Image: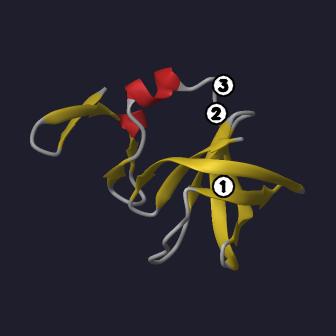
Amino acid sequence: MAINAMDGIQFTQSELDWSSGCVLELNSMENRRLNSRHRTLKTGRIITHDPFSTIDCLVRNASDSGARIEIEGAVVLPSRFELMFDGRRRSCYVAWKLFHHVGVRFA
């Protein structure tokens, strides 16, 4: 079912995140992914090294090649950092940002 939003642009219901009221993932983004992502709701931690810092986050979906994370508050992220969740620590870089959601690709 298509939903009109943002100046008449149509999105399907699966393309909208009703909790935040913003468009998160478009079909073209889905088509560019190397692996399909699986919905999750796991706590994670972003680790930066220059300067050293840790930031709590939620991992909203994940695959072998990347993830979508959610960060609360105004946070400036470097383009590369480590993401720790599910007992693993992965090097990653930012693929896209939209408000408090960040798409990362694992290195």
The extreme right residue here reads 87
Give the secondary structure at mark 1. strand
Q: Dot 1 corresponds to which residue?
A: 59
Left or right: where 72 falls relative to 80: left
Q: Does label 1 or label 2 sit earlier along the sequence?
A: 2
* Residue indicated by mark 2: 37
The x, y position of residue 79, in whole percent, is 55, 56
Distance from Cα at disc 3 to Cα at disc 1? 16 Å
Image quarter hosting the C terminus: top right
SS at circle 2: loop
Residue contact between numbered discs 3 and 2, judged by CB atoms under 8 Å = yes
Q: Which residue is mark 3?
A: 35
How many marks the image carries: the answer is: 3
Picture quarter with the N terminus? top left
Residue at the far left: name it: 7
Identity of the amino acid at label 2? Arg
Q: Could you tell me how far apart the alpha carbons at marks 3 and 2 are, in whole angstroms?
A: 6 Å
